[in-house]
Image: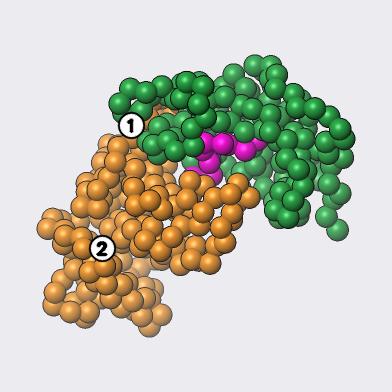
Chain colours: A orange, B green
Amino acid sequence: MKDINQFTDSKHRGREFVLATRTQSLLKQIELPVPQTSSGYHLFLSPSGIDAASINWSAEIQLGGNANTRLFEFLDDLKCMKSLPDNWNGYGSERPNSRTRDIAEWILLATPGFRLPDRVAPSAQGGIGISFHDRDKYADIECFNTGEILGTIVTGNGEPEIWPINFNEIRIALKKIGDYLAP
Amino acid sequence: MPPKYPQELLWKGRQLDPAFQSDELLYYRVEGFDVQGKVNVDEIRAPDTSVNRGKYSRPEHVLYASLPKYLNFKVAQFQVREIPKELHTGDGRAITFRVEHDPTIKTNEVDENYAHSEIRAFEGNERKKNISQSVLKQYRIKLRNVMAPAELPASSE
C-alpha cells in the first residue's frame, strides 16, 4: 500500500495539475453539469482554482492508495489509444475517436470514491470498454464512437442487465456497478 | 523466424461449404482471458464475428492472420450450437445469428483463409449490419459465456 507521500512527489504533483486542468477543459468541452453530490469528484471542480483542485486530488489519493496508481496507468492507456491505427485488432475495428477518449477519461476521473475498473481497453465495437470484476460478477461501461454509452451488469452466465447511460448519469452508473459487485 | 503460413488454410480449388454441424468448433483470436477465465467483452466484435471453422483448421490457425502480429495471442473456442440464436430489439424485432462460411482471398490486408467464417445477424432473411449496440451487447455477453480457452500446441503459446 503506497502512502500519500509517494504520490505527492514532483512527478505526481505535476500530473495532479494536469488532471485538474484537463478535467476543467473536459467539462467545458462536453458541457456536463457539475456534480453536486459526495464522493470526491466534485472536489476536482472547485472554482477556487488549480491549487485547490490539486490539494483535493491529493486527498483523494490518500483515500485510494494503490488504486490511484492504476488510475494513472489507465489514463496513460487512454492517451496511448490515440495512436492506435484503424483495424488495430485485425477484425476491422475503428480506433477510439477523440470524443470517446474524452468520455472515457471523464468516467475514469469520476471513479475516486467509487470502484476502480479492472480493465480499460479499446473496444472491438469501435470505442472503449471499462470493465469491472468481482468473483463471478462482471460489469462494464462501454463508450462507443457514436457517443452512445452502455452499462452492463451480469452474474456468471445469467441474463445481463444492459442500460443506456447519459453523461450526467455516469456517477449513478458507477455507484450502481459498485453496489452490484460488492454489496 | 516466424512459422510458415498453414497450407490447410489455402483454398486449393475447394468450393464453399455452407453446412455446419452443430458440434463443429469455431475459433476466435483473443489477446487473453480475464480473471474469470473468460474472453474480455471488449474483444468481441459483432455483428460479423470473424472465426475459423474447426472442420477445416486447427485452433492456432487464427493466430496466423497478418503473420507474425498475433502469434502470441490466445484462442477461444465454442460450438456452432452455442451461438446465441435469437435476441430481441427494444421494439420487439427478432434478430437471429448464424455462422456462414466466408473463405477469404489474399489481398493487401487479408490473408487467404479457406476456414474463415462469420457469425452474421439477420432480421428475417435480410442480413443486418446496423443493429443497436444494446442487442449486440447481449450477444457479446452470451458469446463470452460459451467461449473457452482452446488448447494450443506448445510452440504457439
Q: Position of residue A143 (x, y in %)?
A: 38, 50
Which one is in front in this view, the residue at disc 2 or the one at disc 1? Answer: 2
User: Which residue in the structure is indicated by mark 2?
Assistant: A30
Q: Position of residue A91 (x, y in %)?
A: 60, 46
- Element marked by disc 1: strand
Residue A157, quarter of the rendered image: top left
Screen quadrant of the N terminus of chain B:
bottom right
Outermost residue, bottom direction?
A10
Is residue A124 located in the magenta-colored stretch of the structure? no
Q: Is residue A98 left or right of residue B157?
A: left
The residue sitting at 28% across, 76% down in the picture is A21
Q: Amino acid at mark 2?
A: Ile
- Compared to residue A182, the image places residue B94 above or below, namely above
Can I make out residue B83 in this image? yes
The residue sitting at 52% across, 29% down in the picture is B127
- Element marked by disc 2: helix
Host chain of mark 1: A
**Residue segment shown in magenta:** B42-51
Is residue B50 located in the magenta-colored stretch of the structure? yes
User: Which residue in the structure is indicated by mark 1?
Assistant: A161
